[in-house]
Amino acid sequence: MAELHNPHDTLFRALLSDPGRARDFLRDHLPNTIAGQLADAPPEIVEGGFVDEALAGSQSDLLMKVALTSGTDAFVYVLAEHKSTPDPALPLQLASYMVRIWKRYAGTGTARLRALPPIIPVVVYHGAEPWTVPDSLRDMIATDDPDLAFLPGAGYILRNLRAMEIDALSRNAALRAGFITLRQEALAFLAEIAGSLPEGTDLRRQVLEYVLRVYNVDLDALRTTLRTGGHNELEALMGTIAETLLEQGEVRGLARGEARGLARGEARGLARGKAEGEAKGKAETLGRLLERRFGPLPRDIETRIAAAEPDRVEAWLDAVLDAPDLAAVFAEGRPH
């Protein structure tokens, strides 16, 4: 994890950037009238995105080129809506993205402008609130006269992951596991997810990373759950990911209380609350990492951590990853 991106975008792309999983997604989620026109060849992932920069934190997109049984090609544009509540402006945004795709495809070629390929728009939503967005731009235009409703796009295909039965999410076990994770239900289906994502795969790590970054999860409780369920490899992987997230400054999800407090502080712009939340979170995370490496901590060390200034805690966090023993972490003369 050289660079941390939006966790929703990271998992979404990990799920669908594989051509095999992308093909299974299209077969599972496109209407039969469209899926039946797809050739057997897996879709080709087209590089680049079309989401507005201001919306990049709440939307992800993926463009696929698919071969049709007619011998021609089409595009499938998948837009993932990551907001917890649906955005009523989405049909308008989607239409603008489709126009951008056609413009990029056509370039300066007149011939291409006269033969634009079909674009099949698919919206994937995993928010908690019901979907209340209009089905198309036509429903947003204030007229009942069809002669006045000129549209750049007629509609889109909605796949509301929260509203679907688990078995309907996908016939592909890895895709189903990823979608369950996006629905915030990974802990309830932990055994299925562990069995669907083989050990050592990138997607297995990415799913667990998503849980640690997005879920309000207690690390100790999750570790106990994994150990009780016999998922020892996942338990070890969890520790590795947690340490990496800490190194890169990602503390959300590593402990329930401070993560919630930090999120509220950021939302309200409370700089003081954010600083206190970060300090508390780093102190508690330091304690967990020390216990993981060196065993139960002496009472005087716990007291020393609790009373330390933030810059000193930062210095100890830097030291804990490579110190040979507990004493080395707290050695006098170490820069802080």
Image: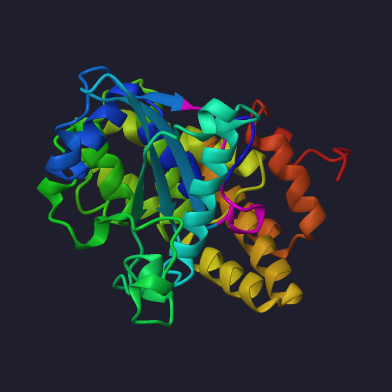
Q: Main secondary structure of the magenta part?
A: loop
Does residue 169 appear in this view? Answer: yes
Query: Which residue occupies 79% across, 38% down?
Result: 331
Does residue 298 appear in this view? Answer: no
- Rendered location of residue 67, percent (x, y): 30, 23
Is residue 114 positioned above or below 190 on the image? Answer: above
Query: Looking at the image, which is closer to me, 143 or 224?
Result: 143
Query: Looking at the image, which is closer to me, 222 or 209?
Result: 209
Q: In which quadrant will I find the N terminus?
A: top right
- Rendered location of residue 204, percent (x, y): 35, 31
Is residue 321 positioned above or below 121 on the image? Answer: above
Residue 36 shown left or right of residue 151 in the figure: left
Is residue 51 positioned above or below 27 on the image? Answer: below
For the magenta stretch, what is the residue range? 46-57
The picture quadrant where one finds residue 266 is bottom right
Residue 328 lies within the magenta run: no
Residue 196 shown left or right of residue 256 in the figure: left
Residue 1 shown left or right of residue 127 in the figure: right
Residue 214 shown left or right of residue 109 in the figure: left
The picture quadrant where one finds residue 66 is top left
Judging from the image, the colouring scheme is rainbow
Query: Looking at the image, which is closer to me, 322 or 219?
Result: 219
- Rendered location of residue 152, percent (x, y): 46, 56
Query: Which residue occupies 53% across, 26% down?
Result: 111
Residue 50 lies within the magenta run: yes
Is residue 149 positioned above or below 222 on the image? Answer: below
The picture quadrant where one finds residue 118 is top left
- Rendered location of residue 100, percent (x, y): 57, 44
